[in-house]
Image: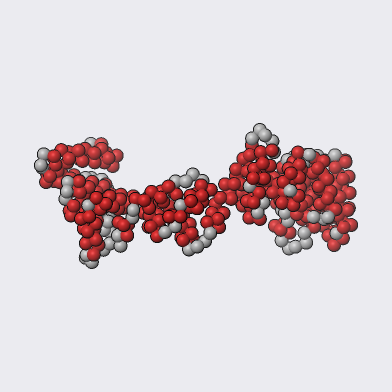
Amino acid sequence: MLAEANPDPYLPDLVIALNNLANRLSETGRLQDALQRYEEIIAEWPGPPQAATELAYHRALFLLRNGETGDGTEALCGLLAPDIVTNDEMVFRIHQSLREAAASDPEVRESVARLYADRSVVFESPSWLELTEQALRLTADWLNTRTWAESRDFVTTHPALLDADSRAAMREWSLLGGPADFHIEMLEQLLSGVPVDTVYRPLVLPEILTAWIRTTTDDEGWSASAAYLADHAADLLAPDADAALAVMGENLEGADQVVAVHRAIAAMAAVDGIDDAYRLLEDRQALHTRVQKALAAADGPALGWLALIEDGVYDDPWAAAVHWLAVQALDDSPDADGRSGAPIAAVRAAVQTTDSAPAHVLSAAAHVKTPDADERNRAVAELAALMAARPTRAAPLGEILQAVVAPPLRAPEE
């Protein structure tokens, strides 16, 4: 009763039992009886059409095993007809069975060719029949590499992968789903002459960046991070690395500040060198000195990155907010918020305010961590010096200065 109500779960056991019965009957010379049992079960099976196709597939294999090459080949090819309910996984299995049979019996290959030449049967070209096990194994090994870096290295060490056989093999693997379709796109680029490193750069770079960020979770402080950056400087200090980090910061929930700090490290390492960049993370006075240098040069991008370190490493959101606002004020382009090295959106997120007005940003920062008199006086001196150095930006810088000396705004009462 259960099998009649829900037959699908019982199909694998039925297939095994039916195959065993058919084999016993065949061993006693009752081949037709065995085939009849298959046909009866297929006709009476109450499940969906796909289940009947599964049973018909095993019947065809039984024919091939018992020397009925023509009938077995025709039965398998018949399951590939458009009007038969056959999913892609079954198509792959049929192709593989016919390839294996053709490898040991030339008559199978001839039978398939004859069936495909018969215009009364609508089939695609049987290019899959000519696939070698070598091509299938090679492409399977490529698909099964664990990382994109390993995948890239596999391509460079296996030049045989870049040929037409691999393209056909990948089309076969795509029948099983998974990553094959994406690899086909990559293979087409490689076959068209796009360099391996160009194809893999967008894939390998996030792996390198992720590994670099993970080094900071170790107990070694910043030393492991510095060593990793030194070993991968060509990758991590390239312009596209910052763009990739920015995307990671947007997509990794809860990791935006960590990613922002690493963007700052890379930016400062590219300007000052790796050792000096990491000194900023471990020596507050070194960071203060570098901030003063950026202020003296009215270097907005550097000041923005240094502000990220102030907030993300030293937990000083108010000083960071002053410097972030200064970065925005120094940039007179229409797209100042997006062009500056550390956009003002970062500080608004850090202090949990959506308002970019200096008074609101600094008040929100002060509620997180209240600045003392020395910090306010230092900010006043810095802004006054910037106004003198960049008189054309005196108005926006003056607005920040007013916000620094004014008492914090009160949060609205609910």
For residue 35, side relative to residue 387 (left or right): left
Residue 232 x, y percent position in the rendering: 63, 47
Residue under the point 54% across and 54% down: 200
Q: Is residue 305 visible?
A: no
Residue 262 x, y percent position in the rendering: 68, 46
Residue 372 x, y percent position in the rendering: 85, 39
Question: Is residue 59 or residue 325 the one in the foreground?
Answer: 59
Residue under the point 85% across and 47% down: 379
Residue under the point 67% across and 34% down: 220
For residue 249, side relative to residue 18 (left or right): right
Q: Quadrant of the C terminus?
A: top right
Q: Is residue 12 visible?
A: yes
View extreme (bottom): residue: 119
- Using the image, determine if residue 262 lies above or below residue 389: above
Question: Is residue 153 or residue 322 the one in the foreground?
Answer: 153
Question: Is residue 414 or residue 266 the one in the foreground?
Answer: 266
Q: Quadrant of the N terminus?
A: top left
Report which quarter residue 239 is drawn in: bottom right
Residue under the point 48% across and 51% down: 157
Tell me, what colour scheme is on the image? Answer: secondary structure
For residue 103, side relative to residue 138 (left or right): left
Residue 11 x, y percent position in the rendering: 26, 41
Report which quarter residue 227 is drawn in: top right
View extreme (top): residue: 219
